[in-house]
Image (cartoon, rainbow, N blue to C red):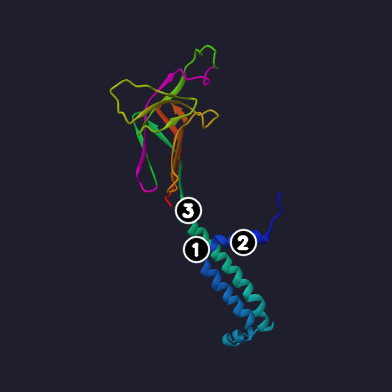
């Protein structure tokens, strides 16, 4: 384990703060006032007519600058946290939704624009692709798997190894795709549908994935876990 370095820590912190006007101004004022108190304690004592048991000059020179610097550091850091959280180039959404059969959910980005529509069509039992129910070169299982039949519109999503794409006969909406998705058992990647889009010129990108976390056949509804990440354009 590398040793902790106060020099590196303070240096990295200052680099972050100095990117923003608020924290920089706060630190500048704190340093200026602290230096003024340290260099001219007698003048400060005369201005404020301080009378203490301890020599007022010592109080002004050694005590007040330290507290002032500490307060400035705290305010600057809180300001930095608030500003940086608002100016982050990442926006993400992670939530669970419950869909009854026939209902849909519109995933929207940070600006409220529709990204993808997810519709639960039905709950059924199907033979799933290997190696979900049986290893390759072995006979299929006698038991079918409970799955949710889900539509995604538009159709630019891909699927994991344990998700089964469904071929539909015409007529159907050409911009949709449909999958049989079982409950996620142990591998988020294999049980998910997902997509990603990137633009190396602008730095813009999107990533989406979702999987079925619970199938409630008696109530004819499905719970899905969704994650969406979007980077802002530079």
Determine which of the numbered discs, if any, sits on residue 20 in the image.
Answer: 1
Q: Report which residue position mark 2 lands on.
A: 11
Q: CA distance from mark 1 to mark 2?
A: 15 Å
Q: Residues within 10 Å of mark 3 (few under 14, many from 20)?
A: few
Closer to the camera in the image, 13 or 75: 13
Q: CA distance from mark 3 to mark 2?
A: 21 Å
Residue 201 placed where, x, y %?
Answer: 43, 47
Identify whether 193 is placed above or below 11.
above
Q: Report which residue position mark 3 lands on.
A: 88
Q: Which residues are magenta?
A: 110-134
Residue 36 placed where, x, y %?
Answer: 60, 80
Residue at image coords 41%, 34%: 98
Q: Residues within 10 Å of mark 2 (few under 14, many from 20)?
A: few
Closer to the chain start, of discs 3 and 2, is: 2
Closer to the chain start, of discs 1 and 2, is: 2
Whether 219 is among the magenta residues is no
């Amino acid at each position: 384990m590398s040793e902790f370095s106060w020099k590196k820590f303070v240096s990295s912190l200052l680099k972050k703060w100095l990117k923003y006007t608020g924290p920089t101004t706060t630190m500048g004022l704190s340093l200026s006032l602290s230096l003024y108190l340290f260099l001219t304690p007698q003048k400060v004592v005369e201005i404020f007519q301080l009378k203490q048991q301890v020599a007022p000059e010592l109080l002004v020179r050694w005590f007040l600058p330290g507290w002032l610097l500490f307060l400035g550091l705290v305010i600057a850091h809180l300001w930095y946290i608030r500003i940086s959280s608002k100016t982050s180039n990442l926006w993400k959404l992670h939530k669970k939704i419950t869909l009854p059969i026939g209902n849909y959910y519109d995933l929207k980005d940070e600006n409220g624009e529709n990204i993808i529509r997810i519709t639960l069509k039905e709950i059924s039992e199907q033979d799933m692709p290997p190696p979900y129910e049986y290893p390759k070169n072995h006979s299929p299982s006698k038991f079918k798997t409970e799955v949710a039949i889900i539509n995604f519109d538009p159709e630019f999503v891909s699927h994991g190894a344990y998700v089964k794409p469904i071929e539909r006969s015409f007529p159907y909406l050409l911009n949709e795709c449909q999958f049989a998705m079982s409950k996620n058992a142990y591998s988020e990647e294999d049980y998910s549908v997902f997509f990603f889009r990137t633009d190396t010129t602008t730095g813009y990108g999107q990533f989406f994935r979702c999987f079925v976390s619970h199938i409630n056949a008696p109530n004819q509804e499905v719970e899905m876990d969704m994650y969406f990440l979007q980077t802002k354009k530079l």
